Image (cartoon, rainbow, N blue to C red):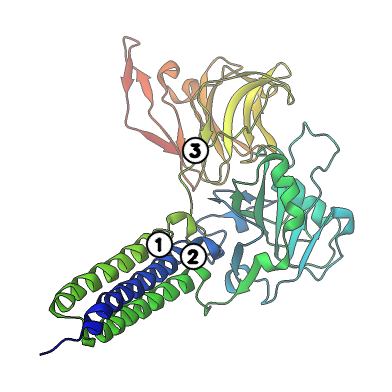
Amino acid sequence: MRINASDRIGWPSRRAGAWGGRIRFFTLCSIGVALLAVCPTAYATTFTFNTDPFAGTNVLNTPGRQIVANESFINFTPATDLFSLESTVFGVGTTVNFVNASAANLPAGGVNVIVLETFDSDNNPATPFGAGNAADVIASQITTPGSGFFIYFNQALNLPRLVFSEDLSSNTADLKVLARMLNLTGQTGIDALPGFTAANFAITTSATAPEPSSLSLFIQVGLLGACWYLVRRRMKIRLLAPMGAAKGILAPARRKRGVGAVALAILTSVSGFSAENQPGGKRNDIEFIKVVDSTTQGFTTFNKFPAINNHGEVAFVGVRNGDAGVFRVSAEGEKLTPITSSNDALFAFGNELAMNSSGVVAFNAITASNSHAIFKSDGTTKTLIADSAANGLAGAFMGAPSINAAGTVAFFPSARNADCHPVSLPAAAAR
């Protein structure tokens, strides 16, 4: 076979041009994959709430307003993120009727999503402005009954929260806190509230379209397939070109490396689907929440061991305005309820309290007749469970009480034998 000199001279340049084309091709693929790898951050995060807000509680059968906390801890960006709210569990209709305004500018009705730009209800920054206070402010303006959602800025927590209300027009409606926005604290959070729009909310039904994060995943998989196809097709064309045996050997290896790089970048980009991006996902943040304060609420002493129930209510023993007693405070610290005090002819309250999900507190104390007794109370009705004198028990050895959801109180009693020594008895329970 004869090879012309011109062919020998031109062959290296053709080979160089072919290699240059490959380099450009893989450079473009790499840039595309790099952009693909960061695409999860370009899509909005959707926080979905589609379960019964009061499931597992007796809230709806309990008189008066009940506030259920235990909300999701999230980072929310008003410019991009979305709250997806299931209409069938919240009963709010199928459309978002939105208003972002101060309390004075709220309409009398026709809304089911409110962003409240009022930050205080009594012009006193030292007093709490919690979910109940915000709901009262809203109810004072809205006259048309109906459930709905509102975002308000909590003074004690110093951040905004998303809340569901059974009835926006009622100051006794039960409330469920759905989310607190950890990234919008202080003045940053206050300044962010005007940026919330109707686009941040979607009221959905059970059959919904894929969320943005799912769409992002579909797009990534599709682009991965496209890259695979293009690489295979280009390599196939190049292998057919008269580039010599060396090219035929090297090209498959380059193809595998190129596709491997694409796959690695795709897998890396999928890491953007973290728990924080999941609907209503919770983060394992630890946060200390002040529920009662000696500087503004008249307390001078707190006993050692408070109790807490699954609604976040806290029961404790303290001295307020010189009067020792047992108190219950709501999860946000906005409602303080006296359970009992020395005004009830009780004193020396025990450190160990118990409280059930209905807010009924079991406690022990010494009575006016100097006997040891165990009681339960919700702040309105006080019930004697056991009295050392009346029941022949060794009062100093009466165990700490516990209480279940039905209001049954259990404790470990002791009696005195003939030598006046305490003797343990089977555990006792009483309503």
Q: Secondary structure at mark 1?
A: helix
Kindly give the residue lying farthest to the top in the view shown: 419
Q: Is residue 138 above or below residue 369?
A: below
CA gap, disc 2 and disc 1: 8 Å
Q: Is residue 222 above or below residue 182?
A: below
Q: In the rendered image, which residue does mark 3 sit on?
A: 286
Kindly give the residue lying farthest to the front in the view shown: 5
Residue 383 makes an appearance in the image:
no
Q: Name the residue nearer the viewer: 128 or 143.
A: 128
Q: Which mark is residue 27?
A: none
Q: In the rendered image, which residue does mark 2 sit on?
A: 39
- Left or right of 253? Residue 414 is right
Q: Residue at x 34, y 71 (%)?
A: 20
Q: Residue at x 35, y 11 (%)?
A: 420
Q: Is residue 187 above or below residue 8?
A: above
Q: Amino acid at mark 2?
A: Cys
Mark 3 or mark 2, which is nearer to you? Answer: 2
Q: Name the residue nearer the viewer: 219 or 64.
A: 219
Q: Secondary structure at mark 3?
A: loop
What is the crowding at mark 2: few (fewer than 14 residues within 10 Å), some, or many (at least 20)? some
Q: Which mark is residue 269?
A: 1
- Left or right of 43? Residue 340 is right
Mark 1 or mark 3, which is nearer to you? Answer: 1
Q: Earlier in the sequence, mark 2 or mark 1?
A: 2
CA gap, disc 1 and disc 3: 29 Å
